[in-house]
Image (cartoon, helix red, strand yellow):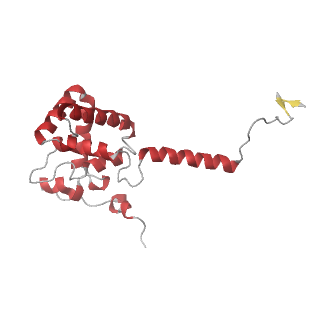
Amino acid sequence: MVRDGFSATPLKKEGPVLNRREVLLAGAAASAALVSGCHTRGSRWLVFTEAESRTLAALCDQIVPADEWPGASEAGVVTFIDRQLTGPYRRYRKTYRHGLEDTAKLAVSRFGIELDRASAAQQIQIAQEIERQNPEFFELVRRHTLQGYYGSPRHGGNKDAVSWRMLGLAEPPLRGRAQYDFTAGPKA
């Protein structure tokens, strides 16, 4: 019996057939695999590897170096960038991966050591070379470093409002959801 071009007889199913539970378990396994690719168990980073975070910290510290005030890495800029790469900056993940890989390779080829172990003068040389070789990546890191250093501490950077204190600015009053510390977990 055919009605409106559709057969009323059921289609014969061939091959393995998955039930709903198997489909859900497969989806959960695939999601876990995706997440584990971004975050290593036991790592404090959501996107970066430990090596990438050290390379980025050294690069950010050349953009905002420490003096009598903490530099970029001490102010949590790498944490800020890492968190933002899981949301608003997600589209820059590949740019960071490739740029940090190139930066690490340059430091090893030039000085035989990782960037975070290089002297301040060597780190400046590598930062200047990256700025010449890959200006788009360097500009992205520069912008994100400044955003993390001078932005709101609730986004992971500007730890203890260090840049605001340095500039003599009062912390703005908390409004809306900013007044809640979402990282603290549920209240008992």
- The quadrant of the image that shows the N terminus is top right
Res. 4 in view: no
Q: In the rendered image of this protein, does residue 169 appear above or below residue 7?
A: below
The residue shown at (37%, 53%) is 43
- Residue at the image point whose x is 62% and y is 49% from the top: 25
Rendered location of residue 12, percent (x, y): 82, 35
Residue 137 is situated, as x and y percent measured from the top left of the image, at: 27, 32
Residue with the most extreme right position: 1
Foreground pick, 142 / 170 = 142
Vertical arrangement, residue 93 with respect to residue 178, above or below: above
From what the image shows, is residue 168 above or below residue 31?
A: below
In the rendered structure, the answer to whether residue 9 lies left or right of residue 119 reads: right
Q: Residue at x 22, y 31 (%)?
A: 109
Q: Residue 173 placed where, x, y %?
A: 26, 61
Determine which quarter of the picture holds residue 187.
bottom left
Q: Quadrant of the C terminus?
A: bottom left
Identity of the residue furthest to the bottom in this view: 188
Q: Quadrant of residue 63?
A: top left
In the image, 151: left or right of 67? right
Q: Does 180 sit above or below residue 10?
A: below
